[in-house]
Image (cartoon, rainbow, N blue to C red):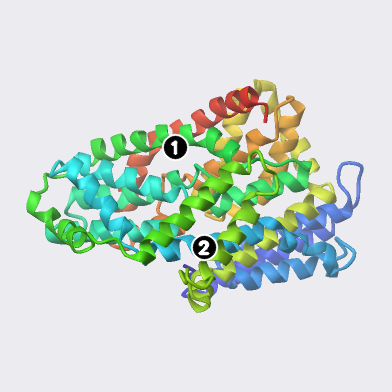
Amino acid sequence: MENTDVPMPKRLIGIGLAIVCIAVSMMVPASEALSHQGAVALGILGALVCLWVTAALPLGVTALLVVVLCPVLGVVDGLGKAIGGFASPALLFIIAVFSMPVIMLKTNWGVRLINALIGWTGANSRKLVLGFMIATTLVSTVMSDVPCTVLFLGFALTILKAADAKPLQSNLGRCLMIGIPIAAVTGGMATPAGSSFNVVAMNILQQATGTSISFLDWAIVALPVVIVMTPISWFFITQLIKPEPIADSCLQGIRDQAASARKIEAYEIKAILIIGAMLVLWIVGNWIPVLNATVVALIGLTVMFLPGMDLLSWKEFQNSVPWGIVIMCGTIMSMGGVVEATGGAAFLANAIAGSGVMGLGFFAAFAILLALIYLLHTVCPIGVAILGIFLPIMITLCANFGVSPAVPTIALAVVVAGNYLMPVNPTVMLTYGEGYYTFGDMFKTGIVPSIALVLIMAAWMPFIVGLMGI
């Protein structure tokens, strides 16, 4: 959700910094290392980040302004070359996939899933937190992080209310409110459908190298990371913030909801069938190239509107798509192509290579760069912009080591999505707003999982991608 209540001084600072970035870049003379157009492209990208970080202008307005500046300042010839990202199949995928959470939220499948889990966990509070995190992770593999968090947040609040768990007093409340969004962003790593970051990264890879990663290949590479990170996160959350015992009677509300939803409606059958069919087709696309992620998503979206299906109305779909985010994604895809074409990405890659970090060997250098990007995203939660800036650079650096570009593509998408340290991204802010935990609570539970994520990505990605020959 976009913040519309930004203090005027912060907005003016953002605009001032953006102007400085562009002004400085325009004074940079052309050289063998960097063309003048490349310098200005980097300046515009810096201005974009300043405006987004300070929320000086609405997301969509900032995105469109930056696109217009490219031809106006002579970076590209004509507006057509500045808006290439808006013609990207990845952008259509992002739009279409927002239909999936809408139809699922209209069903009782989530209630039934939670009821099955509490049948396993009973009143054991640590197992209850684990059950919620497993369920959230599972659903988030095919549902965007924010609606997935909203879904399970509602179930958790039902239990906390029944248990009279007060904000900032209940450790169970702390654990659930931290664990649910962490599980959502973790599950989103598993497949291209789980997070828009994944699709943006795939598109940048396509633009930079002409190669792509299939749905199945992504899942094979990333799913083991998800399987490992979910219990690691749960362990440190429940060890450092020990949840108090919960009475069995507090779970009765979920049981009652599930009992009233015992009859499976026709709508629910159609919804689960269409989502299941899309998953199957995404996997089949590994062998039938025409069934790529975008084609399947658009076919699935169309089927939802067919007579006899009627899973979705056009008004519901329009309201479900965050159009500001869509425009933002289109802009960063466009800017990624512009920075690459003007030599800006190669210049930054050479600067990093010349810093000496690459002399440490691939594993150490890759881990350090992932850690730095992770920390940057922690304080500046603008994941799409970070991907647009750093992924072309990382692809170039990995090429110097003879490492597949698929390694930095998946690794950066995962690291940008999986931020466990502070509640500053939209997914985690949803539960932080309920008041159950503090910044410090989340930070202390996220330190070890964050380190583990970076190290796992640095070690696992080159190994599995090389083994699979992607």
Separation of disc 1 and disc 2 at Cα?
A: 22 Å
Specify the label residue 226 is tagged with.
1
Question: Residue reaching furthest bottom?
Answer: 315
* Residue 89 spot, x, y in % from top left: 69, 57
- Viewer-proximal residue among 394 and 126: 126
For label 1, the SS is helix
Are circles 1 and 2 on residues that touch, CB within 8 Å? no
Q: Is residue 149 left or right of residue 299?
A: left
Specify the label residue 137 is tagged with.
none
Name which residue type carries label 1: Val
Compared with 271, 420 (above or below) is above
Name which residue type carries label 2: Phe
- Viewer-proximal residue among 43 and 85: 85
Question: Residue reaching furthest front?
Answer: 308
Residue at 26 percent across and 47 percent down: it is: 175
For label 2, the SS is loop
* Residue 386 spot, x, y in % from top left: 62, 50
Compared with 218, 363 (above or below) is above
Give whichever of discs 1 and 2 has the lower sequence position: 2
Q: Is residue 323 left or right of residue 27?
A: left
Residue at 80 percent across and 41 percent down: it is: 346
Compared with 122, 161 (above or below) is below
Q: How many marks?
A: 2
Q: Which residue is identified by label 2?
A: 98
Residue at 56 percent across and 56 percent down: it is: 382
Q: Is residue 411 at least partly visible in the picture? A: no
Closer to us: mark 1 or mark 2? 2
* Residue 292 spot, x, y in % from top left: 65, 49
- Viewer-proximal residue among 404 and 336: 404
